[in-house]
Image (tube, grey):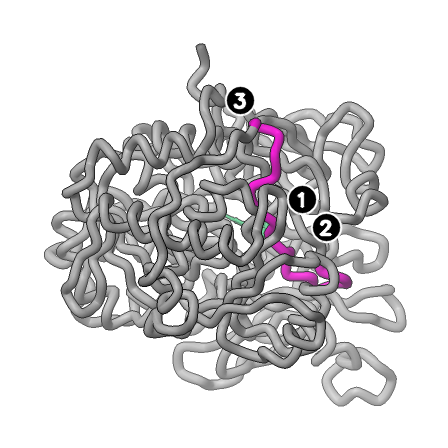
Amino acid sequence: MPKFFVSESLYERLRHVALANVDQTCLRLPDGSVISYGGLLEQSRLVASVLVGNGVVQGDRVVTHCEKTPLTLALYLACLQIGAIYVPLNTSYTPTELAYFLDNARPKLYVGGEYLDVVAERGITQLTLDASGSGTLFETAQDANPYEATATQSAEDVAAILYTSGTTGQSKGAMLTHGNLLSNAETLNEIWGFRQDDVLLHALPIYHVHGLFVAVHCVMLSGCSMIFQQKFVVEELLHELPNATVLMGVPTFYTRLLTQAGFDRTRVRNMRLFISGSAPLTEQTFRQFHERTGMEILERYGMSETLMNTSNPLLGERKAGTVGFPLPGVSVRITDDNGNELPNNEIGGIELTGPNVFPGYWRMPEKTAEEFRADGHFITGDMGVKDDEGRISIVGREKDLVISGGLNVYPAEVETAIGDLADVNDVAVIGVPHPDFGEGVVAVVVTDTGEPLDTQRVRGQLKGVLAGFKQPQHVETVAELPRNAMGKIQKNVLRERYQHAFAKGATHA
Ligand code: AMP
């Protein structure tokens, strides 16, 4: 039987591991206190009791808008236990955004700490949970009796809804089933070699696929422990590294670690694995990291709708600039606009199928239909290429593709070339309206020295590296690139900021 076959519910699997490791540390908190598997399971049963007491039944949505606390994790487990659909929201959402999510998800219960008036206006029951773990959820759970029953659920039942970041339009709720979550968790656990003596350094948010499903599931399926940091603070990460064996991070974790003088081979002596994802890891960062630590970062690729799709190998060559091979059971193809598969080494859209792929967007059947081919392949919206070995490289989001003078310019290629130039610390390449070319290429760079780069000089340095049409027609130097919490560069912000770069009368066009 293949590893990814779903034989029992995700909750049952997690509960079995927890029961087999009741005294083992599951979470180590910043104040040095620990929560055992038995303790976390007990807390989640108390929370399940509170949910049931508030009328939450199987299939109801529970929206969480909470900071990262152990109780937030217990709340997730409680939803799995009773078959409620867990809907975590990014804590930085505004009241208007929260209203949109509440109207779309129509939850039975809201747990959070902010904008309670927006929740109350909609007649939704609310419980509070603040950054210290206090609030009415905690208080009611203290007085509850542990809830013992587990809902009967099939692999097809929805376990969670993750809202996409929605930078180009309406945010969509990706429904993830118990089968999606368990199959992906089992695969990752296996291919990354998780063991009971691992210690995962957890500094990611837990409202996102990376920190919640990838990190937490790998830990909880293997019965190992995690150092649970509420937020990413590079000094704290550095401090805890000697106590950990695995780090899962977004590329920003790695670029920030590289700025720290104390980050060296001694610091990582107990580490066996550094994993990166959620945004592209540059070849420069991969190389610098290797030079500094002697270790190669393992890059993988995934998204809210599909969990993890590909990974570089645990054993075997990890290639900078690639996201590795499709996971067992996942099939990846590169296609033209009509969904026809392209030969190896040709750039096209990334489409995939597998037990990890979501069944659709919550209450948006038309959007779902638009993003699936008739044969069931999901159109990821990412563009990439497969080499002859079967490794996948991502060249950018389809919407970020620049078409200049009718020619395709793939931002990742230009970013890699510019990233190799002296004094360049960070770079994003975007396309903005151009009177002659339709779109013109703009490179937004951060320099080591803070000195601005001259467009003509950059073009001169790229001669022989990149064809003329790929070279930036304008270079803008900034102090910092806008990134979201997952380290993704917000190219829509940059496109808006520089939309007039080539307008008639613009000084630099
Ligand atoms: P999200 O749904 O927020 O997790 O975003 C998913 C998107 O992040 C993917 O569709 C990719 O565009 C991007 N992404 C994730 N992992 C990688 C990676 N390793 N390299 C490049 N882009 C990535």
Q: Residue at x 50, y 68 (%)?
A: 127
Horizontal side of 100 relative to 134 (left or right) equals right
In the picture of the structure, the residue carrying the numbered disc 2 is 398
Q: Earlier in the sequence, mark 2 or mark 3?
A: 3
Q: Secondary structure at mark 2?
A: helix
Q: Nearer the viewer, residue 410 or 397?
A: 397
Q: Nearer the viewer, residue 243 or 419?
A: 243
Q: Are marks 2 and 3 in contact (CB under 8 Å)?
A: no
Horizontal side of 20 relative to 287 (left or right) equals left
Spatial CA distance of label 2 from label 1 is 6 Å
Magenta part, dominant SS: loop
Q: Which residues are magenta?
A: 154-171
Q: Earlier in the sequence, mark 2 or mark 1?
A: 1
Horizontal side of 335 relative to 84 (left or right) equals right
Amino acid type of the residue tagged 1 in the rendering: Met
- On the image, the x and y values in percent for residue 314 come to 32, 33
Q: Nearer the viewer, residue 200 or 176?
A: 176
Identify the image quadrant of residue 385.
top right
Q: Residue at x 28, y 59 (%)?
A: 228
Q: Nearer the viewer, mark 2 or mark 3?
A: 3
In the picture of the structure, the residue carrying the numbered disc 3 is 329
Q: Specify the label residue 383 is tagged with.
A: 1
Q: Residue at x 85, y 45 (%)?
A: 366
Q: Nearer the viewer, residue 471 or 266?
A: 266
